[in-house]
Image (spheres, grey):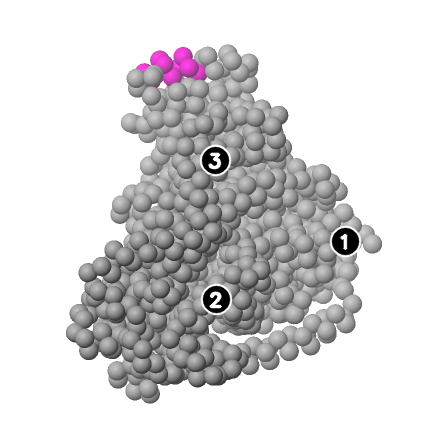
C-alpha cells in the first residue's frame, strides 16, 4: 500500500516537472498585479462577506456601486452618473449610467440594485453587515422579518434607468455608504438562472473593472479585466491575482522576492526594519480607526469609579506606546474619534498630556481617594485577544500602571472567546478597536451609547445618549458636528474608556506602480493602478 | 527468522535481586559513559540556573527598562543578553521560561511515558479482543480535535498550568503506546518470553520484567523526541491563550516571538533557541547512555 | 488475515461514530460561537444567522440533523468560506496536502532510514555523532523557524526558488515546503532507526546468524533491517496521517492551498461544519493508517499474528 502511493507520488512529481518547464517557457506577464491580502474572501455574494479589509479589496475590484472611489478614497460617480437629493434629505434619485453592463453583456439596471439590497436585508440571507443599510426606510423591519421585502424604500423607475431611495432620516454619510460592498448591485438575471450557484466561477458575472476567473481556495483568486466595463479602455491592468498571505512575515519575504507587487499589511514590529531597508516601498498613513481599552463601568467593578478611570488614563503614556513599543507604527490617541473624520474636529481628553510626574502624583492621589492602598491593592483584570501587538501593548500598560500600586492580571484568549467574554461583561479592562465602516463620527460614538452591543463596558450616560439622539435628527452639518463633539467630550470627561492609539494603514507597494495612493479608508481600487515601466 | 535456543540471560537472575541490581548496575554502566555524564551535569546546571538564576539577576520577570527597548546583547546596557520590544531583560525571561518549559517537559513526558508504556505493553501482550478495544480507544483519542479538548478542560477546571501538562501528556502517550505495543507484539513471540511462560512466571512479571525492559531502546529514544514536541506544543497552547499567561513565559513562546523578529533582533530567537537546543542535545546523549546501561541483552 | 482486515474495517464504523459524537458535543459545549467577533451583531441579525444554520434548535436535534446529512454524504456548507461546501474544500485541498506531505515522507524515509542504519553500524564513530548532531538540530529547530529561514535564504537572498505560492504545484514551488516539512521527520526517523538497529544488532539471533558464518551484508539486509523497522512503522502510522493532512505553519508561510490550516482555523472560527469535516476525515485516515501498520507488522515479523 505504501509502495503504491509512492508510485503515484512519483508520477505527480514527473508531471509537475513538465508543468514547471512549461511555466518557465512562458514570458512573465507584466500587466498582472499581484496583491498579498491578509485573509480569505468569504464569498462573492456581498451579503455573505465577513468584514475583512481584504474582502473589500477584492470586491471593489470586481463590483461597482452607484458611486465608486478614486485613488485618494474620494467618492465619484460609478453606476450612477448623477443624482438628486430632496429638500428634506430623505429621498435620493439616482440616474444610472447608459451602457453600464455586467460581464456577460447584460445591462446593469436599477432592478439589480433593488434586488441586491433586498437580498442583503432578507432575513434568510442572514447577512452580518445588513445593518449598514438600515438608514433606508423600513430596512430594519425587513431585516427582522416584520415587513415583506418589497416594503424596502427602494424603487426602480423608467425601465430600470432610475433608482429612487427613501431614507428614514437625513443621513449625511449616505453617499459614502454607497461605495461599501453592502450597497453593490447583484446580477438578478444570473441569480434567476443559477440560484445559489451563481457565485461559482463558471457562472459569476460582475459589473466592475475586473471579473473573477479562478479561485484556488486559501491560495489565490484571479480576476481578469472586464471587457464590458464602461471604462475598459482606461483600465491598464490585464488582471489581478490576490494571494492569501496570512503570515505577514512570509508576505514580506514574497514581496522582496518580487512575487507580490502590493502587500496589504505588515506586522508593526517590522516597521522600522522595512523603513530602513525598503524605504520606497513602505507605506504608513493615518487611518480611520481607534485602538482603545474598554473600561467596565458596571456596578461592582473597580473601574465603575470615575477616579480609578481617570487615574488609569493619566498615567497611560501614549507617546511611549506609539514611539517606543510600537516603534512609530501607530499614532498616539487621546480621543475616540480619530483625526480625518469628515465634519469633525479631533477632541482631547483632559489632563493626559502634562508633565508625567505631576500626572503620576495626581493619579496616585485619585487611587488613594478611591480607597486603594498598600493594604487594599487595586487588582484589575485585563483581557486581550491573541496577537503580538495586543500583547506588547498590554504588557506596557501593565508596567505603566504599576507605579499606582495597581496589580494587573493579563488574560489573553483567541478572538471568539475574547469577544464573547467581554460581551458578557466579565472583565475590568479589555482591548478593543474600531475601524470606521464609513467616514462619520457617529460610527465611533455609537460605541458608547447605552444598550448598544458594542458598548462592552456598559457605559451609560443619559446626557450622552440625548446628544447623539438629537444629532441624528439634525440636517445642518455644522450643527450636527457641534452636537457630536459635545457628546464625545461628555464621555471623555467621564473617562469612559482609555483611548490609546489611532490605527494606521500599512502597505508595501512596488515603487514602479502608479495610481495607488495612501488614504484614510485604506481603499485602493486596482482599476486606477498602472505599472510605470 | 533465526531460531536461537539460548534462554535470555535475564531469566537466570534470581527474581528477588533483579530490581535492586538493575538500578545499581545501570548506574555503574552510566557512569562509564562520558558523553552521558557530561550531559547529565549540563542538564543539572541548566535546571539549577533556571531555578535560582532569576534571584541573582537585577531584573524582574515583568520589569520594564524604560531606557532599553529591543537592546542588543552587551555589557553597557546591563542586559547581557539584550531586551525584548517591551524593554524586558531577555536572560531573566529565558530563565523563567526554562522553569515552565522544563517542568512541562518533565511532567508531560513522564505522564506519556508511564501511561504509554503500560498501556502499550498490556495491549500487545494480552492481544486479541482487549488489544483491539484498547487500540480503538487510541484511534479515538488521536482523532478528537485537540484544541476543543483543551478549551473544555480549561472551562471545567479553570486556568491552571498543571492542566497544560495534563492535556499535553494526554495526547503524547498515544504514540508511545503504539510503539510499545508494536514491540510487544514482536517480543512476545520470542523464545525467552515463551520460556518464562513455561516456567510459570506470572503475566504481570513477564510484562514488567521482560517485555518492557526489552523494548526500552525505542522507548528512550521516543522520550527524547517527545520533549521538544511537548515544549513547542505548549507554545501553541499559549498562543491560543490556553497556556502560560503574560508576564510568565516559556522557551516555546520566546522562540515563536523571536521568529518574527529574526531579521531585526536576532538575539530574541537565538538565546532561547540555544537554551532549548543545549537541553535537547544533553537529553539525547543521556538517553543513549541510559539505553546502553539498561539494555538487558548486553549485560 | 483477510478476516482480520474485514473485522477491523467493520470496527471502523463504531470507532468513527464515537469520534464524531464526542467531537460534536465537545465543539458545541466549548465557549465562543461562529458569530462572535470584534463587532457584535444586532440581536435580530444574530437570530437570522442562527436560524439559517439551524443553531436555534436544541443540541440533540442538531446532532441528529448532522448525522442524517452525514449518512447521505453531505458535510454541509462551510460557515466561513461560504462559496464552498466542506466536501469541496477538502476535495480541493487534500490532493495538495497529500502531494506535499507524501513527498516529505518519502524524502524523510529515503534520507532518514539509511542515516539511521549507517549511524547504528558505525556506532559512536565520528560519522555517528555527525549524523545524530544534524538530526538533533532538525528536532531542536521547530518548523515555524525553519520555514521562514528557508524562504528568506533561498527565496529572497539567493533568489533560487520562489519564496512562496503554489503555482499549481510546479516543482520549484514544491521544494522548500517539502524540505521544511521533512527535516523534522528525517530527524525522527533517523533517531528511531538508529536506536532500533542497535537493539536488533545486539540480539541473540543476529549473533546466531553471524555465528552461522553469514556475511555482514546478509546479516544486515536479511535479518537486521526488517525487525528494526518495527518501531519506525509504529510511529509512521499516525505520523503519515498527520503529515498528509497538511501543516498549518508550512501552508501559511508558503501560501499553499492544503487542508492543514482548516484544522486550526476552522476551530478558531468555530466553523462547526468544517471542524466536523476535518475530524471525520482525519479520524478515518488514522483508523486506516493504524490498520495498515498492523498489517505491515506481519510483513516485518511473520511471527506476529492476530487472532481472528
Residue C100 horizontal/vertical position (percent): 55, 68
Considering the numbered disc 2 on the image, is that residue within a helix, a strand or a loop?
helix
Name the residue tied to disc 3.
B93
Check the image and name the residue furthest to the right: A533
- Can I make out residue A279 in this image? yes
Residue A46, image x and y in percent? 53, 57
On residue A530, the disc is 1
Q: Which residues are magenta?
A: A363-372
Front-most of residues B162 and C285: B162
Q: Residue at x 68, y 41 (%)?
A: A274
Question: Residue C278 is drawn in which quadrant?
Answer: bottom left
Q: How far across and how far down the image is residue C232, in percent? A: 44, 70
Vertical position of residue A305 compared to residue B297: above or below: above
Crowd around label 2: few <14 · some 14–19 · many ≥20 (10 Å): many
Percent from the top left, x then y, of residue A349? Answer: 51, 21
| Membership of C228 in magenta stretch | no
Secondary-structure class at tag 1: strand
Q: Height in image: A522 above or below C250?
A: above
Q: Nearer the viewer, mark 1 or mark 2?
A: 2
Whether labels 3 and 2 belong to a single chain: the reply is no
In the rendered image, which quarter contains the N terminus of chain B?
bottom left
- Give the alpha-carbon distance from disc 3 to disc 2, as whole Å: 36 Å
Q: Residues within 10 Å of mark 1 (few under 14, many from 20)?
A: some
Name which residue lies at 48% across and 33% down: B92
Q: Which mark is residue C194?
A: 2
Magenta segment, principal secondary structure?
helix
Badge 3 and badge 1 both on one subunit: no
Pick whichever, A367 or C10, lies toward us.
Answer: C10
Find residue A380 and report its image quarter.
top left
Which chain hosts label 3?
B
Amino acid at each position: 500500500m505504501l509502495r503504491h502511493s509512492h508510485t503515484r507520488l512519483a508520477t505527480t512529481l514527473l508531471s509537475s516537472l513538465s508543468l514547471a518547464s512549461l511555466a518557465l517557457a512562458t514570458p512573465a506577464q507584466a500587466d498582472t498585479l499581484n496583491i498579498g491580502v491578509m485573509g480569505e474572501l468569504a464569498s462573492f455574494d456581498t451579503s455573505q462577506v465577513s468584514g475583512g479589509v481584504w474582502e473589500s479589496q477584492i470586491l471593489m475590484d470586481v463590483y461597482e456601486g452607484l458611486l465608486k472611489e478614486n485613488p485618494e478614497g474620494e467618492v465619484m460617480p460609478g453606476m450612477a452618473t448623477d443624482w438628486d437629493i430632496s429638500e428634506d434629505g430623505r429621498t435620493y434619485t439616482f440616474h444610472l449610467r447608459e451602457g453600464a453592463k455586467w460581464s456577460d453583456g447584460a445591462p446593469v439596471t436599477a432592478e439589480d440594485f433593488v434586488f441586491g439590497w433586498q437580498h442583503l436585508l432578507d432575513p434568510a440571507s442572514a447577512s452580518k453587515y445588513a445593518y449598514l443599510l438600515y438608514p433606508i426606510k423600513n430596512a430594519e423591519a425587513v431585516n427582522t422579518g416584520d415587513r415583506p421585502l418589497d416594503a424596502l424604500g427602494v424603487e426602480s423607475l423608467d425601465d430600470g434607468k432610475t433608482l429612487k431611495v427613501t431614507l428614514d432620516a437625513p443621513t449625511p454619510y449616505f453617499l459614502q455608504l454607497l461605495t461599501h460592498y453592502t450597497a453593490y448591485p447583484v446580477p438578478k438575471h444570473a441569480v434567476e438562472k443559477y440560484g445559489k450557484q451563481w457565485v461559482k466561477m463558471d457562472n459569476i458575472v460582475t459589473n466592475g473593472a475586473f471579473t473573477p476567473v479562478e479561485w484556488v481556495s486559501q491560495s489565490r483568486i484571479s480576476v481578469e479585466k472586464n471587457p464590458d466595463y464602461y471604462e475598459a479602455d482606461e483600465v491598464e491592468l490585464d488582471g489581478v491575482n490576490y494571494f492569501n498571505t496570512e503570515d505577514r512575515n512570509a508576505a514580506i519575504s514574497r514581496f522582496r522576492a518580487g512575487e507580490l507587487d502590493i502587500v496589504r499589511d505588515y506586522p508593526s514590529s517590522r516597521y522600522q526594519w522595512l523603513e530602513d531597508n525598503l524605504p520606497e516601498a513602505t507605506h504608513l498613513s493615518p487611518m480611520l480607526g481607534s485602538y482603545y481599552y474598554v473600561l467596565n463601568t458596571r456596578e461592582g467593578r473597580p473601574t465603575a469609579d470615575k477616579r480609578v478611570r481617570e487615574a488609569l488614563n493619566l498615567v497611560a503614556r501614549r507617546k511611549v506606546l506609539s514611539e517606543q513599543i510600537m516603534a512609530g507604527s501607530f499614532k498616539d490617541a487621546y480621543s475616540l474619534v480619530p483625526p480625518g473624520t469628515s465634519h469633525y474636529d479631533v477632541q482631547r481628553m483632559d489632563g493626559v498630556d502634562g508633565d508625567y510626574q505631576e500626572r503620576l502624583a495626581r493619579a496616585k492621589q485619585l487611587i488613594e481617594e478611591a480607597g486603594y492602598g498598600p493594604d487594599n491593592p487595586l487588582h484589575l483584570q485585563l483581557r486581550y485577544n491573541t496577537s503580538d501587538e495586543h500583547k506588547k501593548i498590554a504588557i506596557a500598560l501593565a508596567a505603566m500602571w504599576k507605579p499606582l500600586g495597581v496589580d494587573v492580571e493579563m488574560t489573553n484568549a483567541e478572538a471568539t472567546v475574547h469577544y464573547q467574554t467581554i460581551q458578557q461583561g466579565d472583565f475590568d479592562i479589555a482591548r478593543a478597536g474600531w475601524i470606521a465602516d464609513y467616514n462619520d463620527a457617529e460610527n465611533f460614538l455609537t460605541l458608547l451609547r447605552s444598550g448598544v452591543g458594542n458598548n462592552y463596558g456598559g457605559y451609560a450616560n443619559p446626557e450622552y445618549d440625548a446628544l447623539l439622539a438629537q444629532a441624528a435628527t439634525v440636517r445642518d452639518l455644522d450643527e450636527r458636528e457641534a452636537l457630536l463633539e459635545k457628546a464625545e467630550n461628555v464621555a471623555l470627561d467621564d473617562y469612559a474608556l482609555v483611548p490609546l492609539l489611532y490605527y494606521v494603514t500599512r502597505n508595501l507597494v512596488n515603487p514602479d506602480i502608479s495610481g495607488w495612493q495612501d488614504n484614510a479608508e485604506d481603499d485602493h481600487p486596482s482599476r486606477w493602478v498602472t505599472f510605470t515601466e | 527468522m533465526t531460531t536461537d535456543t539460548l534462554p535470555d540471560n535475564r531469566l537466570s537472575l534470581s527474581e528477588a535481586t533483579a530490581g535492586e541490581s538493575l538500578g545499581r548496575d545501570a548506574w555503574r554502566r552510566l557512569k562509564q559513559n562520558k558523553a552521558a555524564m557530561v550531559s547529565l551535569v549540563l542538564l543539572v546546571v541548566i535546571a539549577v540556573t533556571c531555578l535560582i538564576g532569576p534571584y541573582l539577576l537585577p531584573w524582574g520577570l515583568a520589569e520594564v527598562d524604560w531606557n532599553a527597548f529591543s537592546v542588543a546583547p552587551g555589557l553597557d546596557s546591563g542586559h547581557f543578553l539584550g531586551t525584548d520590544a517591551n524593554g524586558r531583560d531577555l536572560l531573566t525571561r529565558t530563565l523563567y521560561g526554562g522553569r515552565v518549559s522544563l517542568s512541562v517537559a518533565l511532567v508531560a513526558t513522564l505522564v506519556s511515558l508511564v501511561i504509554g508504556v503500560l498501556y502499550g505493553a498490556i495491549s500487545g501482550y494480552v492481544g486479541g479482543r482487549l488489544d483491539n478495544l484498547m487500540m480503538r480507544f487510541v484511534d479515538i483519542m488521536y482523532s478528537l480535535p485537540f484544541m476543543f479538548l483543551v478549551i473544555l478542560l480549561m472551562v471545567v477546571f479553570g486556568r491552571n498550568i498543571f492542566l497544560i501538562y495534563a492535556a499535553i501528556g494526554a495526547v503524547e502517550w498515544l504514540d508511545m503506546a503504539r510503539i510499545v505495543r508494536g514491540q510487544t507484539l514482536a517480543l512476545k513471540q520470542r523464545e525467552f518470553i515463551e520460556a518464562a511462560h513455561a516456567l510459570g512466571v506470572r503475566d504481570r512479571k513477564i510484562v514488567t520484567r521482560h517485555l518492557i525492559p526489552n523494548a526500552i531502546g525505542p522507548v528512550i529514544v521516543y522520550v527524547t523526541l517527545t520533549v521538544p514536541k511537548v515544549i513547542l506544543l505548549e507554545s501553541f497552547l499559549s498562543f491560543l491563550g490556553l497556556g502560560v499567561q503574560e508576564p510568565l513565559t516559556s522557551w516555546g513562546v520566546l522562540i515563536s516571538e523571536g521568529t518574527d523578529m529574526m531579521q531585526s533582533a536576532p538575539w530574541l530567537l537565538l538565546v532561547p533557541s540555544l537554551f532549548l537546543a543545549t537541553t535537547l542535545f544533553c537529553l539525547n546523549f543521556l538517553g543513549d547512555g541510559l539505553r546502553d546501561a539498561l539494555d538487558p541483552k548486553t549485560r | 488475515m483477510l478476516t482480520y482486515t474485514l473485522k477491523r474495517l467493520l470496527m471502523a464504523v463504531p470507532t468513527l461514530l464515537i469520534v464524531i459524537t464526542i467531537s460534536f458535543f465537545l465543539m458545541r459545549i466549548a465557549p465562543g460561537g461562529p458569530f462572535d467577533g470584534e463587532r457584535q451583531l444586532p440581536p435580530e441579525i444574530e437570530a437570522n444567522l442562527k436560524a439559517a444554520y439551524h443553531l436555534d434548535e436544541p443540541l440533540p436535534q442538531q446532532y441528529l440533523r448532522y448525522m442524517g446529512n452525514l449518512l447521505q454524504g453531505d458535510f454541509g456548507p462551510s460557515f466561513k468560506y461560504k462559496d464552498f461546501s466542506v466536501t469541496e474544500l477538502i476535495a480541493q485541498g487534500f490532493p495538495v496536502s497529500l502531494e506535499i506531505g507524501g513527498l516529505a515522507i518519502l524524502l524523510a524515509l529515503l534520507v532518514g532510514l539509511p542515516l539511521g542504519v549507517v549511524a547504528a553500524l558505525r556506532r559512536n564513530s565520528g560519522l555517528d555523532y555527525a549524523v545524530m548532531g544534524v538530526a538533533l538540530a532538525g528536532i531542536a529547530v521547530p518548523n515555524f523557524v525553519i520555514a521562514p529561514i528557508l524562504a528568506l535564504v533561498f527565496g529572497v537572498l539567493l533568489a533560487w526558488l520562489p519564496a512562496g505560492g503554489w503555482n499549481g504545484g510546479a516543482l520549484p514551488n514544491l521544494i522548500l515546503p517539502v524540505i521544511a516539512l521533512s527535516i523534522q521527520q528525517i530527524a525522527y526517523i533517523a533517531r528511531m532507526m538508529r536506536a532500533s538497529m542497535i537493539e536488533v544488532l545486539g540480539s541473540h539471533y543476529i549473533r546466531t546468524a553471524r555465528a552461522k558464518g553469514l556475511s555482514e551484508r546478509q546479516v544486515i539486509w536479511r535479518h537486521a533491517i526488517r525487525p528494526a523497522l518495527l518501531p519506525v512503522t509504529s510511529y509512521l502510522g499516525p505520523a503519515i496521517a498527520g503529515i498528509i493532512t497538511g501543516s498549518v505553519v508550512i501552508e501559511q508561510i508558503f501560501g499553499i492551498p492544503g487542508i492543514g490550516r482548516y484544522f486550526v482555523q476552522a476551530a478558531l472560527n468555530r466553523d462547526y461544519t468544517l471542524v466536523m469535516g476535518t475530524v471525520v476525515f482525519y479520524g478515518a485516515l488514522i483508523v486506516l493508517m493504524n490498520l495498515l501498520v498492523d498489517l505491515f507488522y506481519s510483513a516485518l515479523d511473520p511471527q506476529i499474528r492476530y487472532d481472528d
